[in-house]
Amino acid sequence: MPDTTTTLQVLKDAMARFVAERDWQQFHSPKNLVMGLSVEAAELMEHFLWIDNDASRQVTQDARKLGEVADEMADVACYLLALSNTLGIDLSDAITAKLVKNAPKYPAEKYRGQYRLEEEPKSK
Amino acid sequence: MPDTTTTLQVLKDAMARFVAERDWQQFHSPKNLVMGLSVEAAELMEHFLWIDNDASRQVTQDARKLGEVADEMADVACYLLALSNTLGIDLSDAITAKLVKNAPKYPAEKYRGQYRLEEEPKSK
Amino acid sequence: MPDTTTTLQVLKDAMARFVAERDWQQFHSPKNLVMGLSVEAAELMEHFLWIDNDASRQVTQDARKLGEVADEMADVACYLLALSNTLGIDLSDAITAKLVKNAPKYPAEKYRGQYRLEEEPKSK
Amino acid sequence: MPDTTTTLQVLKDAMARFVAERDWQQFHSPKNLVMGLSVEAAELMEHFLWIDNDASRQVTQDARKLGEVADEMADVACYLLALSNTLGIDLSDAITAKLVKNAPKYPAEKYRGQYRLEEEPKSK
């Protein structure tokens, strides 16, 4: 089921079945799921903890390591799918809306090659 | 673009365009992206910080709050899509593989209604 | 070395020695250390993932579990001490300054028994 | 109150007073506090998100930025102190025990200049 043909709904449904088969909806409160998501994000970070940015790009050359990283990414994704199911959120709509919202916030001509504007004060 | 008809590839491509238009690939090392993912996961957690699990489920009754949560979920998703692009990982495959791998790890008949087995020692 | 008699400096020095003996200062960039801190915070969260707030308070009744939690708290603390060392930050001063700054931000008479004011808009 | 003369207990007591004055003990379940700790760790990470390790070390040259970082570190520390108070944990003891435990786990002669051994398999 590659990305080119798999819809988000198919993945959300697969996740929902996994949860329902175990009667785990009772544990899937938004609070618990966002905690779990954050824990998985940290496990993903652990793979890149002591290295530089350049070295982190080299993970693509190490099939075993890349597989481990993909595995952690799947964990993060599963929590996100489960949270979408619990909250009834359409994730594709949310992502699309976000990109539309961020486009004028980060005008391409101003932000080209910069992650923030030189004169910009810290954002929060 | 609802979840029922949107493939992961369409979303990954939209994200890739957003990044390329700003020449941001140089910042999108795996190390930076997993940090960003974790930061967004924390912003998502912040919405559920001081409340109980039951109260966290009530977010579905508050349209404005639910919109804010969807917005943060989109941020998490965008980092995940960007990381998939940087690493060349097929996310749908990874998620499907994960569910297949987890099914025998958490047999439905044993884990029904339990997030862990009573006698199970801590996992790490 | 209990909290009643141990200064932060004694702990910072112990951490600095541990790092110097292994010649690990080269890995202790602020970027790496904050990632490590966040990873340890997640490991601490994992202990309280699927339970309610009330149940989380019961950890004090389980000596083995409490020991595991203390162990993870020490990991978080060690990264914080290491970061203070790398950056030359006086942590006691920073904590005291923070409490002084937060006192008028959260006036006791207004916030008593509330983690935020009813009419308060979301903070960010 | 510098690190050279401030004990952990003094800081824990200051934190406990801040919490008691607002009757916030009811919100300070371990589950909530570890979530808050993780959120603050992420806010600390945000300062070092898009830069390299080398650049992150330059924060010491920027007084304003360094102040912001110290401020976030204080937030992390406050949650750790609050959690120690809720759980009745002696943090100095836990930190000291951790360093004693980690010394033979990472023998100086083997780990000098290496954050992990070459042949070591991934730890989890």
Image (cartoon, coloured by chain):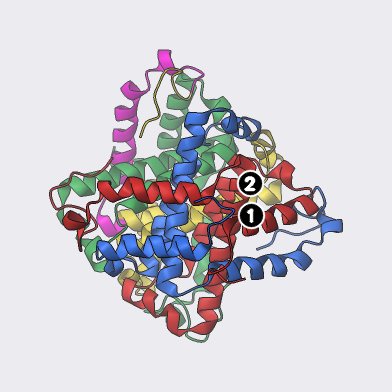
Chain colours: A green, B yellow, C blue, D red
Q: With respect to residue D49, does D11 lie above or below?
A: above
Q: Amino acid at mark 1?
A: Lys
Most extreme residue toward the left is D119
Let me know if residue D117 is in the magenta part: no
Residue A18 spot, x, y in % from top left: 42, 26
Are circles 2 and 1 on residues that touch, CB within 8 Å? Answer: yes
Q: Amino acid at mark 2?
A: Asn
Give the extent of the magenta segment.
Answer: B85-114
Q: Look at the image and tell me whether residue A80 can be seen.
A: no
Callout 1 environment at 10 Å: few (<14), some (14 to 19), or many (20+)? many
Residue under the point 22% across and 49% down: A66
Q: With respect to residue B82, does A116 lie above or below?
A: below
Let me know if residue B112 is in the magenta part: yes
Q: With respect to residue C11, does B123 lie above or below?
A: above
Give the numbered dot on residue D12. Answer: 1
**Label 2, label 1: how many angstroms apart (C-alpha)?**
7 Å
Q: Is residue A80 left or right of residue C17?
A: right
Q: Is residue A79 left or right of residue B64?
A: left
Most extreme residue toward the right is C109
